[in-house]
Amino acid sequence: MKKVVACALAILVVGCAVRLGGPKPVEYRTLAFSVGEGAGPAEVAQWIRSADANLVLLAAAADSAWFSEVAKQANLKLSGPGSAGSVSFAFLAGEPVGDTTIALPLPDGGSIGVHDALYRVDKERLLDLLAVQIPSAAQSREAVKALLNYVATDVMPEAGVVLAIDVPDPATGDSVSALLSPVFRDARTCLRPGAREPEDDASWRMRLFFGPETKLTCEEARPLGGRGPLIARLIFSHY
């Protein structure tokens, strides 16, 4: 595990020296959430519009038509959906350079589904979005190890990364956050003063991470509507 983390860190920090001048920082109003059963596209699109989100990582047990309608009503481009077991993942943002959905094998014979999309911020910067489902606490350590290995080998080293992980319960989310902390920062650590964490409701179980901090920083985060999901202002620096 330590070797995988070290490798992922080495990949992510390549090209991190600060340069004078260059392109301006870009703000991503980032929303990551898992939609409970019964939510219609219009309702979900309204949540996105109310957050003024321009980067959305979304999980739902829904078909492609449902995701397409959400994207249409939110006025964002759709990447996906990609199946990841009990849910499908999709990203709503600009036009991706490319996207894919893969299954990462685990030692117990299972696998975790990953949806991955690459976006060009400008001629010098790239943004990679990842979404993963970890179905059980028992699989969290091996799942994180597989994910970090994927980042180290398949994510472009010059890209900033935004990662959403769908977890079964808060304890698993906290465990995953601790395991990822050498490489990715949990957006809950930048909750603005006085803001409470999202309630432990299954509808808002998506955890949001970003990194490396030499590229991406978090200005603030807050639960949308006071209870969730988490909306975070992520800044892609000019580096």
Image: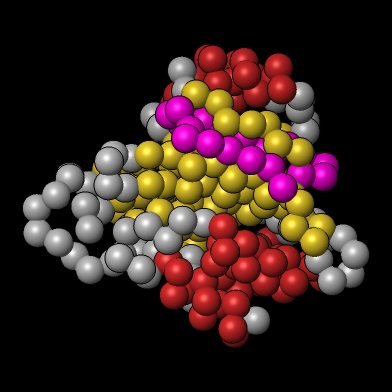
Write the residue at 81% across / 66% down: 106
**Horizontal arrangement in the rendering, residue 192 relative to residue 67 (left or right):** left
Q: Which residues make up the magenta segment?
A: 84-102
Q: Is residue 90 magenta?
A: yes
Residue 80 visible? The answer is yes
Residue sticking out furthest to the left: 21
Q: Which residue is at the front of the view, 59 or 94?
A: 94
110 magenta-colored: no
> Colour mode?
secondary structure
**The C terminus lies in quadrant:** bottom left
Tally of numbered discs: 0
Q: Is residue 45 visible?
A: no
Which residue occupies the extreme bottom position in the image? 2
Say which residue appears at 43% left-offset and 39% top-offset: 119
Magenta part, dominant SS: strand
Decide: is 226 above or below 73. below
Q: Does residue 65 sit above or below 209 in this rendering?
A: above
Residue 141 at x, y percent in the picture? 72, 73
Q: Quadrant of residue 16?
A: bottom left
Q: Residue at x 62, y 68 (%)?
A: 149
Q: Is residue 200 left or right of residue 117?
A: right
153 versus 197 height, above or below: below
Where residue 19 appears, x then y in whole percent?
Answer: 15, 61
Q: Position of residue 121 (x, y in %)?
A: 33, 40
- Percent across and percent down for residue 220 are 34, 52
